[in-house]
Amino acid sequence: MPLTDASHDDAGLRLAAADAAALADSIRSAGLKVTAPRLAVLRALTDKPHSNADALFGAVYSDLPGTSLQAVYGVLASFTAAGLVRKIEPAGSPALFERRVGDNHHHIVCTRCSVVHDVDCAVGHSPCLTPADALGFDVRAAEVIYWGLCARCQADTLAP
Amino acid sequence: MPLTDASHDDAGLRLAAADAAALADSIRSAGLKVTAPRLAVLRALTDKPHSNADALFGAVYSDLPGTSLQAVYGVLASFTAAGLVRKIEPAGSPALFERRVGDNHHHIVCTRCSVVHDVDCAVGHSPCLTPADALGFDVRAAEVIYWGLCARCQADTLAP
DNA sequence: AAGATTGTTTTGAATTAATCAAAACAACTG
DNA sequence: CAGTTGTTTTGATTAATTCAAAACAATCTT
């Protein structure tokens, strides 16, 4: 099962898609050319954070047929390199992408249904950023993934 | 570049390979049949923790030609399921395996040379095991990977 | 606003890591 | 030592991603 986002569990009414001009601005500000596939990917990612390349391709393709999966990979690679999106790679999952960058937030993944949520890091601030002994490393980032059962899957397990 | 282990940076003299009987015992104790490929994989893993399937296949194959890569994958899957080894999957790397299990230690990876070391978790005990807000999840595990430049690569960067 | 330049996307193929399935085989049980 | 069960081999397949060349489009320059 692919890992999916939790932001739209209750679909229905959805916030208006981010304004195209705002999306174009953030792409331009990152030093990248503004193109239709890039706008579409960024909009899809705004709508559904923690999507993988394939899911984004699906979303983009309906708006913009003729877009290739490789183009989506290319867009995501340039966005990631430009710091516009963040790529996360939970064990056993294809890479997921999100627009929330710059803070060092982490992720919690359900081991049963694979839903992904953002979580702020543990006790205090930047808690996990210092290993007990860095062994001479110049530590630049700490990546934390919590694994467990989400509330819904706990309920399902009790009463299936 | 494949991620590799750091335990043998200065090769040379190596501790005697783990005793075959001890290896067999731990396999048997995990409820698994003792076979030549399993002994060979466990020995290779004792020798070089943080190896990937391919590296282990290479090590095993020299002792035991006729062993298939798929057998190594099978051995690792059964070992992992039995709790005999731990599988880690750092972003951008094939899965790595280690015999150190049961403690919740973490890993530090060099972004330049991909060397992997074990580290005990951050400040205090089980620091990262509690997210700021678990969002209703029943958290079972926290996985922490530190990314940075190892001492050697820092030196190389200053004086290449 | 047109042309030049540079970067992006398409098209098509290849690669890596891992998994699946069936048949042959080997370890432990009694 | 024979039977049962689990393991390994053999061969094929999948999923995710990357590579490369040609076609194309966005921005820069004038």
Image (cartoon, coloured by chain):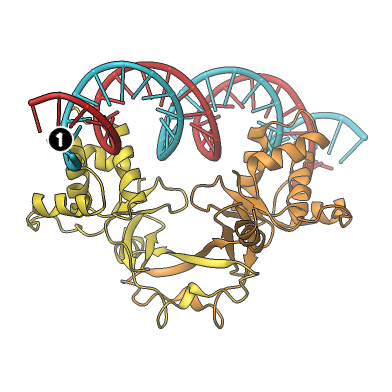
Chain colours: A orange, B yellow, C cyan, D red
Taking A137 as reference, is A85 above or below it?
above
Q: Is residue A34 visible?
A: no
Residue type, numbered disc 1: Ser
Q: Position of residue A83 (x, y in %)?
A: 63, 57
Instruction: Out of B25 and A107, give the one closest to the viewer.
Output: B25
Residue for point 48% across, 66% down: B142
Q: Nearer the viewer, residue B29 or B118?
A: B29
Q: Dot 1 falls on which chain?
A: B
- Evaluate whether residue B109 shows in this view: yes
Residue B159 pos. (x, y %) = 31, 62
Residue A92 position within the rendered picture, expressed as x and y whole percent measured from the top left? 50, 47
**Against B133, is C27 above or below?**
above
Q: Is residue B119 left or right of residue D24?
A: left
Dividing the picture into quadrants, the one containing residue A138 is bottom left
Give whichever of A44, A151 is nearer the camera. Answer: A151
Residue B1, compared with residue B151, is above or below; it is above
Residue A25 appears left or right of B124: right
Left or right side of A155 for B82: left
Q: Give percent across and percent down for residue C18.
A: 42, 39
Dot 1 crowding, Cα within 10 Å, few <14, some 14–19, many 20+: few
Q: Which residue is mark 1?
A: B62
Where's the N terminus of chain A, which quadrant? top right
